[in-house]
Image: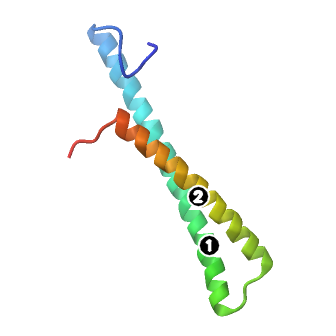
Amino acid sequence: MDDIFNPAGNTPFEKAEARLAVGVAQLKAASALDELCKVSAECDVMINVWRDQILSGSADPETRMLAAEALKQKREVEASIQVIVELMNKHFPAEA
């Protein structure tokens, strides 16, 4: 089966195989989205630690560098989340 979104066969086995492949793809996409959300949350924690240090007047250069890296990574993760969400909406439309 070359294209899981356009199965070639019409036998019950081929249809079941196509549904299984789509389900696996949907599960993998959801899992990747969940991992990206966790990374984004971790970045938020690091950025908030730095902000708290700034407010308390005890910010150190190491925390600032870590927060800068976290902010950079958060931007990349948010772009990846947007791509996955667009792909999921295209291939796995949710019905209300």
Q: Secondary structure at mark 1?
A: helix
Among the 4 quarters of the image, the one containing residue 27: top left
Among the 4 quarters of the image, the one containing residue 88: top left
Q: Quadrant of the N terminus?
A: top left
Circle 2 sits on which residue?
75
Which residue is rendered at x = 22% and y = 42% of the image?
Answer: 95
Q: Secondary structure at mark 2?
A: helix
Which residue is rendered at x = 57% and y = 53% of the image?
Answer: 77
Which residue is rendered at x = 59% and y = 76% of the image?
Answer: 48
Among the 4 quarters of the image, the one containing residue 62: bottom right
The residues tagged by marks 2 and 1 sit, at their Cα atoms, a distance apart of: 12 Å
Percent of width and height locating residue 31: 48, 44
Q: Which mark is residue 18?
A: none
Residue furthest toward the right? Answer: 61
Circle 1 sits on which residue?
47
Badge 1 density bin: few <14, some 14–19, many ≥20, Cα 10 Å: many
Q: Nearer the viewer, residue 63 or 90?
A: 90
In the image, taking residue 53 as reference, residue 23 lies left or right, namely left
- Residue type at mark 1 is Ile
Is 87 drawn above or below residue 7 in the view shown? below
Q: Nearer the viewer, mark 2 or mark 1?
A: 2
- Residue type at mark 2 is Arg
Is 89 drawn above or below residue 13 in the view shown? below
